[in-house]
């Protein structure tokens, strides 16, 4: 396909055959849940590591709390606000990650919690003047009032429409968020800065981890901390992300089974959308514009997606049997809403094998008709964004399944 032309015409989607999650690489069938969990799941996970996201290093890091602040009665009395600086120490360097946590002030005991990365600083998710403004590099997002890669108090709350903080708290959930750039700044620096710099790197290997893998790994380190925090029920943590951070939420859910529920909001190519449809953003385009997101092996499929050993329905299937939510927006054709729905459908046989009967049907639902089966899906009207409608669905889904 000509690089400058993107297909938005359903009739031009090529014929394709998806790799079957329930057939081993040697061609034999996966006959029961045990065979899936013990043998097929690791096989697919390894294929994604090798060909798509890259492999996170196995060397240990030390995770310690460097500082904490706690303020009761924040947000007009609705919340307890905590900020935690987590220090990740590798063999020769360290990295500090700042976690913002809101807990319902009126809680009894440990609360379930949503965790998600944000694009441009913890202070953008709410106008709360108590949130620390990052001093590190942030993207030049003028809509968020950020210039010259420096965040200022002027960008407080700039992304607040994407974070239903009060609704989450009123429903009895906590919320944790981390600026993704604390874990790895979102630009191509040859994998030296951020989390990659903590480890010796061997770029001779095309499966060395990219930024999405680094972000997901950082979410797991945050979960290491949450497991130590008595105010949080770490067995009920939902990981949520939008767009590139939705790709990340899926990969975090796939690699770390401690995430009890996984939500992909408009994650598109390299997230929930089937690569083989080549609808909207393609593998070639994403690898060209964002060369740091995936491992370099992924580029080998730029012009031959049909030969990819995996497709994204298998990523969703890696979450099984945990609840997973795939959400699209009708006007966000770049992220291929239909391709996201079809991936959720094609992941469902794995859930069926694990004993779940009531799953998505083949018919894509109309806008604003959420289906909250264990593999859940909705498409809302409007464009690429996270809205209060999306959060309302995630809260209803978490009430049911978390
Ligand atoms: C786009 C990219 C998408 C999506 C989006 C975002 O430019 O093509 O894959 O990740 O950015 O993260 O907002």
Image: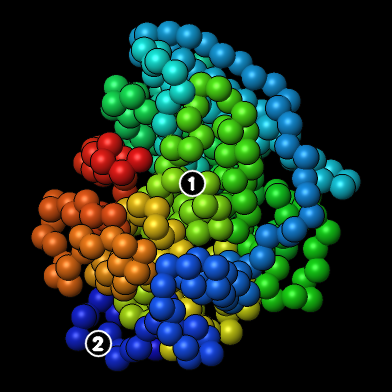
Among the 4 quarters of the image, the one containing residue 16: bottom left
Label 1 to label 2: alpha-carbon separation: 37 Å
Residue 226, x across and y down, in percent: 57, 32
Q: Which of pointers 1 and 2 indicates the residue nearer the eye?
A: 1
Please report the residue visible at 37 percent of the width from the left and 28 percent of the height from the top.
173
Residue at 44% in and 37% down: 236
Q: Establish if 235 lies above or below 273.
A: above
Residue 286 visible within the image: no
Classify 354 as above or below 8: above
Residue tagged 1: 259
The crowding category of the residue bearing disc 2, from other C-alpha atoms within 10 Å (few below 14, some 14 to 19, many at least 20), is: few
- Earlier along the polypeptide chain: callout 1 or callout 2? 2
Residue at the spot of label 2: 12
Residue 252 at x, y percent in the picture: 52, 53
Residue 334 occupies quadrant: bottom left
- Residue that appears at 75% across and 75% down: 205
Quadrant hosting residue 279: bottom left
Which element is circle 2 on? helix
Give the colouring mode of the picture: rainbow
Residue at (39% x, 88% y) in the render: 1
Q: Nearer the viewer, residue 135 or 221?
A: 221
Task: Measuring from the top left, give residue 258's x and y in whole percent.
Answer: 52, 46
Which class describes the residues within 10 Å of circle 1: few (<14), some (14-19), or many (20+)?
many
Q: Is residue 159 left or right of residue 300?
A: left
Disc 1 secondary structure class? loop
């Amino acid at each position: 396909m000509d690089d400058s032309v993107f297909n938005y015409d359903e009739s031009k989607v090529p014929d394709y055959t998806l790799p079957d999650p329930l057939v081993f690489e040697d061609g034999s069938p996966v006959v029961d849940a045990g065979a899936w969990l013990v043998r097929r799941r690791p096989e697919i996970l390894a294929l994604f590591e090798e060909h798509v996201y890259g492999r996170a290093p196995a060397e240990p890091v030390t995770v310690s709390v460097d500082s904490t602040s706690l303020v009761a009665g924040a947000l007009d009395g609705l919340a307890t606000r905590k900020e935690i600086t987590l220090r990740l120490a590798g063999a020769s360097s360290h990295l500090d990650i700042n976690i913002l946590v809101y807990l319902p002030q009126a809680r009894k005991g440990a609360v379930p919690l949503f965790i998600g990365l944000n694009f441009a600083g913890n202070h953008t998710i709410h106008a709360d003047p108590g949130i620390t403004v990052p001093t590190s590099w942030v993207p030049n997002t003028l809509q968020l009032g950020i210039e010259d890669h420096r965040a200022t108090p002027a960008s407080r709350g700039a992304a607040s429409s994407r974070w239903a903080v009060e609704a989450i708290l009123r429903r009895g959930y906590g919320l944790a968020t981390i600026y993704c750039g604390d874990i790895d700044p979102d630009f191509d620096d040859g994998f030296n800065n951020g989390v990659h710099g903590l480890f010796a790197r061997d770029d001779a290997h095309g499966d060395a981890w990219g930024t999405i893998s680094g972000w997901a790994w950082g979410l797991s380190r945050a979960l290491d901390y949450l497991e130590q925090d008595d105010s949080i029920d770490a067995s009920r943590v939902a990981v949520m992300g939008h767009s590139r951070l939705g790709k990340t939420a899926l990969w975090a859910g796939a690699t770390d089974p401690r995430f009890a529920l996984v939500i992909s909001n408009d994650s598109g190519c390299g997230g929930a959308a089937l690569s083989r449809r080549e609808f909207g953003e393609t593998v070639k385009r994403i690898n060209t514009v964002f060369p740091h997101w995936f491992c370099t092996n992924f580029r080998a499929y730029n012009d031959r997606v049909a030969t990819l050993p995996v497709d994204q329905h298998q990523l969703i299937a890696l979450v099984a049997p945990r609840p997973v939510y795939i959400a699209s927006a009708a006007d966000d054709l770049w992220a291929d809403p239909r391709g996201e729905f079809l991936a959720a459908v094609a992941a469902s046989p794995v859930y069926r094998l694990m004993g779940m009967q009531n799953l998505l049907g083949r018919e894509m639902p109309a806008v604003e008709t959420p289906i909250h089966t264990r593999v859940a899906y909705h498409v809302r009207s409007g464009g690429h964004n996270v809205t209060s409608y999306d959060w309302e669905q995630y809260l209803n889904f978490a009430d049911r399944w978390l």
